[in-house]
Image (spheres, rainbow, N blue to C red):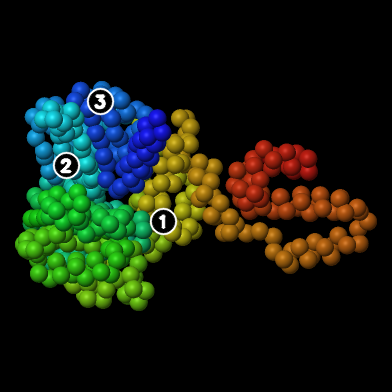
Amino acid sequence: MEQTKMTVEYLQYLISMYKRILDEVDVGVHAVDASGNTVIYNHKMAQIESMDIQDVMNKNLLDVFMFKEDQTSTLVKALQEGNETKNVKQTYFNNKGREITTNNNTIPIYENEKLVGAVEIANDVTKLERLIKGNITRKGSTRYTFDSITGNSTVMKEVIEGAKRAARTSSYVLIVGETGTGKELFAQSIHNASSRFSGPFISQNCAALPDNLIESLLFGTKRGAFTGAIDQPGLFEQANGGTLLLDEINSLNLNLQAKLLRALQEKTIRRVGDTKDTPVDVRVIANINEDPIDAITNNHMRKDLYYRLGVVTVFIPPLRERKEDIPLLVQHFIKKYNVRFQMNVMGLSEEVRKSFLDYDWTGNVRELEHIIEAAMNIIMDDEDIIKYPHLPYQYRSKMHGKVKNISTASVDNFIQERADIPASLKDQMEYFEKSYIEHVWKNNDHNISRTADVLGLSRQSLQYRMKKLNIKND
């Protein structure tokens, strides 16, 4: 009896150990019995498939997961054919319809020569697949040309003309500009005006790349290079014959910048885990959102990579340096959102126009477009002019500092003028509050919404105070 008790306890101990080990390994493990019902499903597999373990355990996998018409489950295939498969990529869907891509080793399990189940060891390649698919712009589907660029200022005309000249050759291009100035618009325009216009255009934001996927994504992988690695072309190979845009190139780590430099110089790439080089015919356009000299000084960019990429350098000026283009841009965005929202907005009020010309536009053209879009979401159906109250609160709050308030000298004069007048502190404070509100209200052209923003009050609170202080809102 004691021996039987020890055996049961030992089995429970082993089961606990196995379960802990399965949940700690960095691969997905999914085992089914001969009927296809799940008997083992570890935490990593649940994470890969975005599933709750209880939604999978003891259920038939075909009742839980969905597969494309031309594909079947590798686990089911192992049960049906009894064959082991290695490094098979499989794409399927979980119970919420989310697409999953894994690289699988699938093994049928025999007991006394009888097939009793199958186990699958899976590595997640969903993220890599989505990154690659999301960055490819197929032939002919780029949206922008030089005709898409809005601007008649002298500085913009010079930049556009320089970019058009760059499109005639296959030299690498470095586009420099603050966030929101339209760097990708220029990159696509150069591609579409070049002899490579019929080739692929691939855009990749380098700042969005996780460190453990950067090299694999750019240069591709060789089967067996690491756990779960399959033969996968990188963005360079997929852009062959076309253009590869590397956005925020200064976000790449310096070691990878050195490998990128070698690819640019040799015009070859080597997949991760491979021993041979593959020639590629790719024009690289790189974007950077800071001054290249500052990027080099701050160790954000290698000097030799800058010289290699900057054969042709296009500097896009910020919007604050070409404010004469603002009216043209405003009309362009109003026209765009009139079509999208089925509206008939005609333009801006004089107050809004003046504020736009007085604003610094730290977010550049993109910020201007967002403000126009936000205002057209607020404007009423019977209105056709964007007025100051239609503008988003974030914009109006930034303009506070540009509104003239009462100076310190004015406050001193007020104290001297009122010092000898017998009145309680409450009366003096009410008099000053009334004077201050009237002053700000006058400076804001008697606009209630703007005055409330400057004073840090709601419209209702300001109207209540004005009524209390007998300030006429005519």
Residue occupying the far right of the picture: 422
Numbered label attached to residue 329: none
Tell me residue 212's x, y (percent): 28, 57
Give the quadrant of residue 344: top left
Q: What is the spatial separation of the Cα atoms under label 2 and label 3, in whole angstroms? A: 19 Å
- For label 3, the residue is 37
- Which of 316 and 14 lies nearest the eye of the viewer? 14
Tell me residue 143's x, y (percent): 21, 46
> As shown in the figure, which amino acid type bears the numbered disc 3?
Asn
> What kind of element bears circle 1?
loop
Tell me residue 464's x, y (percent): 73, 38
Which one is closest to the eye, mark 3 or mark 1? 3
Q: What is the spatial separation of the Cα atoms under label 2 and label 1, in whole angstroms? A: 49 Å
Residue count near mark 1 (Cα–Cα under 10 Å), binned few <14, some 14–19, many ≥20: some
Residue drawn at (16%, 34%), measured in percent from left and top?
109
Residue count near mark 3 (Cα–Cα under 10 Å), binned few <14, some 14–19, many ≥20: some
- Which of 364 and 279 lies nearest the eye of the viewer? 279
- For label 2, the residue is 105
Query: Could you tell me which quadrant the C terminus lies in?
Result: top right
Q: What is the spatial separation of the Cα atoms under label 3 and label 1, in whole angstroms? A: 55 Å
Residue drawn at (14%, 66%), measured in percent from left and top?
263
Give the quadrant of residue 51: top left
- Which of 378 and 322 lies nearest the eye of the viewer? 378
Residue drawn at (62%, 51%), measured in percent from left and top?
454
> What kind of element bears circle 2?
strand
- For label 1, the residue is 363
> What kind of element bears circle 3?
loop
Tell me residue 164's x, y (percent): 17, 61
Query: Could you tell me which quadrant the N terminus lies in?
Result: top left
> As shown in the figure, which amino acid type bears the numbered disc 1?
Gly
- N-terminal label among 2 and 3: 3
Give the quadrant of residue 342: top left
